[in-house]
Amino acid sequence: MVLKAICLVRHGSRERYGDAKVADRKKFDDPSGSRGLNSLDDQLTAIGRQQAQELANYLSSAHPEISAVYTSRHYRCLETVKPYVEKCEREGNDVKFRLEMGLSEWGRADRQQARMPSIKQFKEYHSTLDAKRQSLCSPLGHENLDEFYARNACFLASLIQSLDNEPNGPESVLLCTSASNVTWIARILLGKFPENSVEQDFSVPAIGFYRFARRNVLPVDIDLGRRTPLGYPEIDWKNGVSIGGSWEVTHSADCSFLSTGSIMLWTPSDIPKYLPPCEALQMPKPSLPNFFDIQDLNAGESDLRMECADFEREGVITATAVEVPA
């Protein structure tokens, strides 16, 4: 089965920024990551959850051809697509629900991140979420600009190649991730590499919906012998060269189905200082609590000490999922 369309959506309005309007950019343009542990892996606001439900209704009626959902491991992304997956399940529509590490937000060295949840935490959240499958591409360390492009290109090439070769595979998929990933993925699919990486060629609102239709199909070739310094395969996509053929944008930042309209708008605004891969690989992995950890702590079900930066535990997902003892 050949993949015919890629749908892309940013997560809904999140607690860290609140329900900021487009004009209130100062309220959410905060790269410091200093709004407390909850901000590292926060949940949606009440409006964000409403947006997620409206997204579910829209996708079910306007895009019934979607038969697979790939989501970042961040809680705000899981919470965004869960209503759609549940609606499909209630209506008897077969939709694969897959965790994908390649959709993780930018692993910048200048921002803190929460550690990976365990398979047990994922399965307790939603039983049909496939968290055991090996991701198509996993973050290999703290990423500078070039490496972030490389990881997104590696993920897209692996996704298209695997689905093109999957018998009875999905013809249309939905990806849910963070704003910077949406912009970089859009650029890569269109073969557009701006000289100025903060060029505002894509504006990404909360639950802004994008759809890329495949107009010309070419096989995807991944040369594992060519790799970036951090270790991602080098994928050709710049200067108008698209991955797997040519792609046309049919929907761009569509919020017409949202009662809120366009809010929490993100545009490229800053690029982190270049970090040599040799230094990036030596930096410690994220060790601060994720959303599930904090909920367990608040419920008195965990003895997690949030101030412990080198906390170790079993069953953390890295490149390949690891089972957690019950």
Image: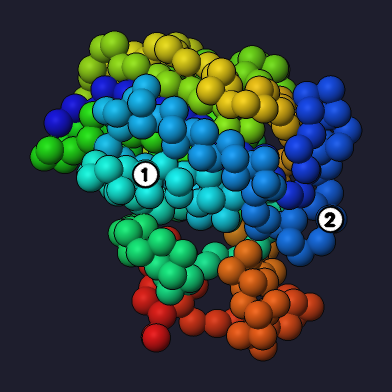
Q: Residues within 10 Å of mark 2 (few under 14, many from 20)?
A: few
Which kind of residue does numbered mark 2 sit on? Arg
> Residue 146 appears at what percent x and percent y?
59, 35
Residue at 43% across / 21% down in the picture? 211
**Going by the picture, which residue comes out furthest to the left?**
167
Residue at 84% across / 55% down in the picture? 35
> As rendered, which of 112 and 280 lies closer to the eye?
112
The quarter of the displayed image where residue 3 is located:
top left
> Residue 195 appears at what percent x and percent y?
65, 16
Quadrant, the C terminus: bottom left
The quarter of the displayed image where residue 255 is located:
top right
Residue at 65% across / 80% down in the picture? 299
- Asked whether the viewer can see residue 207, the reply is yes
Residue that numbered label 1 is attached to? 87
Q: How crowded is mark 1: few (under 14 residues within 10 Å), some or many (20 or more)?
A: some
Residue that numbered label 2 is attached to? 35
Mark 2 residue element = loop
Residue at 69% across / 47% down in the picture? 45
Quadrant, the N terminus: top left
> As rendered, which of 42 and 233 lies closer to the eye?
42
User: Is 287 left or right of 160, judged from the image as shown?
Assistant: right
The quarter of the displayed image where residue 284 is located:
bottom right
What mark, if any, has residue 142 been given in the picture?
Answer: none
Above or below, 106 relative to 66: below
Q: Nearer the viewer, mark 2 or mark 1?
A: 1
Above or below, 297 relative to 24: below
Comes first in the chain, label 2 or label 1: 2
